[in-house]
Image (spheres, rainbow, N blue to C red):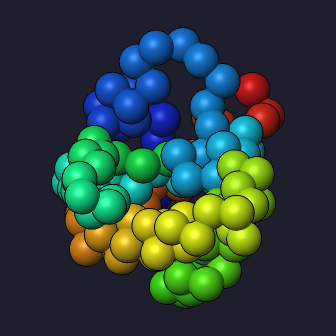
Amino acid sequence: MKNINHPRLRRHYKIPALPKCDFCSSVTVCWLYLTRAFTVPRGDSVIHFGPDWATCHQCHQFIERKDCDGFVKRVAHGLRIDMNARPDAGPFYRAEFESFLRSTNGPPLFMPEALCGTN
Ligand SMILES: [Zn+2]
C-alpha cells in the first residue's frame, strides 16, 4: 500500500479537479493502477489510452476478479450507455478491459484517504 504522494498519482491528478473513476465516472475513486499506455481498436481506427488508471472500488473488484461481463455492465451503467442502441460498445469495452489488464504493472495503489470522498 502506498500513499497519495506517489509521484505517478500526483501526475495523474496534476490538474485540480474532482477525481472520477477512469472507467465508469464514479466519484468514489479509491485505487490507482500503474499501467503502460495502450491502444484499443475501434472500427477502422485505434483509440490511444494513456498510462495509469484511477478506479472506484466497484470497478476495482471487477478488475481483480477479471470479470469482464460485470465490468462492461458497470461501465455502461456509469456512462449511461444504452447497449441496445450501441452494439459496438460491448465489444469495445471488452477489448479495453483486456488491453488494460495486459498493461498493468504490479498491484494497484489503495488510497482511500485521498479520493474516497473523505477529504
Ligand atoms: Zn468505476
Which residue is painted at 54% across and 82% down in the image?
68
Q: Which residue is more in the foreground, 25 or 105?
A: 25
Which residue is painted at 60% across and 46% down in the image?
21
Residue 99: x and y, percent? 30, 69
Residue 49 is left or right of residue 19, and the answer is left
Residue 54: x and y, percent? 50, 47
On the question of residue 92 being in view, the answer is yes
Residue 78: x and y, percent? 74, 53
Q: Considering the image in quadrants, where does the C terminus appear?
A: top right
Q: Which residue is more in the foreground, 82 or 55?
A: 82
Question: Across the whole image, how many numbered discs are drawn on residues?
Answer: 0
On the question of residue 97 being in view, the answer is no
Residue 10: x and y, percent? 39, 26
Which residue is painted at 73% across and 39% down in the image?
27
Residue 75 is left or right of residue 44, and the answer is right
Q: Is residue 70 above or below residue 15?
A: below
Which residue is painted at 33% across and 60% down in the image?
42
Q: Is residue 9 above or below residue 58?
A: above
Residue 48 is left or right of residue 82, and the answer is left
